[in-house]
Image: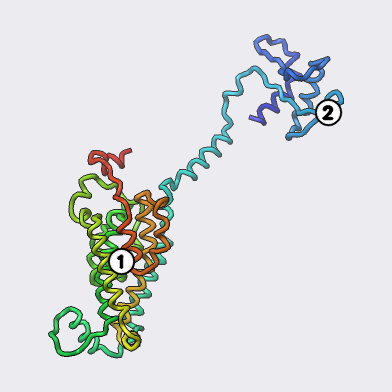
Amino acid sequence: MLANSSLISSNFSSLLFLKNKKVNTKPSFPKSAKFKNPKTQFFKNSIYSNNYINTKISVFGKKGRLYICHSSLNFQNQEDPIMKKDTDVSTEISGGSNNGGSGGDQWDWTTSFLLFGLWGGLMYYVFFLAPNQTPLTDTYFLKKLLNLKGDDGFQMNQVLVSLWYLMGLWPLVYSMLLLPTARSSKNSIPVWPFLVLSFFGGAYALIPYFALWKPPPPPVEETEVQRWPLNFLESKLTAGVTMAAGLGIIFYAGLSNGDVWKEFYQYFRESRFIHAMSIDFCLLSAFAPFWIYNDMTARKWYDKGFWLLPLSVIPLLGPALYLLQRPSIPTVPVSSSPASAEEK
């Protein structure tokens, strides 16, 4: 509009001498300014306005801002195509990832590639590079932990037993975190097969889903939280039992003396089974804060529950405390989800 106004004002002096009475051109002046000869002043302003870049000129010995005169022709309603194009482009860019901070565009294929690379490296390490000096002992330990061997007088390591039972609680914690707020609405890959496999493979079974996950999650219906498995996973009773069980198991391991911990460390250096299980425990503990933040954001509880994020780094107990404190998942009416919500 500034360019158009300057063009009109610079050629306005010639329009004054046109004999076409249909063109009504009248210069406009501010009420505060008093000029002896408005036409002369208007002619001066018309000359300077061609090179106007927010400068000041001297008028009758006083400095004042340059006033650009507009024609009564209806140029004000015309839109500058260049400005309109810039506005459309900026709107498109700003609206491209309007997903509340966790849009699908942010979780791009670079993240997926890195997670798949991490998973591939871990699997290669576990099967080919991890220590495997006691394969027969690993088989014996596994049978004892699964109660497939009777009481033969051998006393299992307390730290090893505690780690085994903690690994049984982690899949339940992740099921409560990933369902329903970590389901993917961008693809048709369900989360429940990976959660089932995590009871046997831990983080090694969950990382592929982490790489394929595309937020945001689909809306949750009111009746969905009343059915299995969400009614079980959303229950405060389930979270309370998980918290109590985790405290008891960690307290049992904490009562062990230094010799028991040294024995476990020796197992870690020699046994592939215990070595891989220990790494699995560390991976599950490392990924938990992110999924707690994701669940907290989906429930719109970050403003009140942000203080739980630093505590989530505590293995198992931090996530269990969050599950015990978090609010219910927001739901939508059955008629609004999922087909009607996508149409909107």
Task: Please identify the residue farthest to the front as the structure is shown.
Answer: 255
Give the answer, above or below, for where 62 lies relative to 84: above
Viewer-side residue, 152 vs 247: 247
User: Which disc number belongs to residue 206?
Assistant: 1
Figure colour scheme: rainbow
Q: Residue furthest left?
A: 150
- The image position of residue 51, as x and y in percent, is 76, 32
User: Three-letter amino acid code at disc 2?
Assistant: Ser
With 326 as the anchor, is 141 left or right in this view?
A: left
Residue 201 in view: no
Q: Quadrant of residue 199?
A: bottom left
Q: Which residue is mark 2?
A: 58
Residue, far right: 61
Q: Is residue 37 left or right of residue 280?
A: right
Q: In x, y percent, where is residue 303?
A: 42, 50
Residue 269 drawn above or below residue 303: below
Q: Nearer the viewer, residue 116 or 98?
A: 98
What is the quadrant of the N terminus in the image? top right
**Residue 14 screen position, x and y as percent:** 75, 18
User: Which amino acid lies under the numbered mark 1 shown in the image of this protein?
Assistant: Leu
Q: Earlier in the sequence, mark 1 or mark 2?
A: 2
State the CA–CA distance, disc 1 to disc 2.
Answer: 75 Å
Placement of 21 over or under 169, stated as above or below: above
Q: Position of residue 15 (x, y in %)?
A: 72, 17
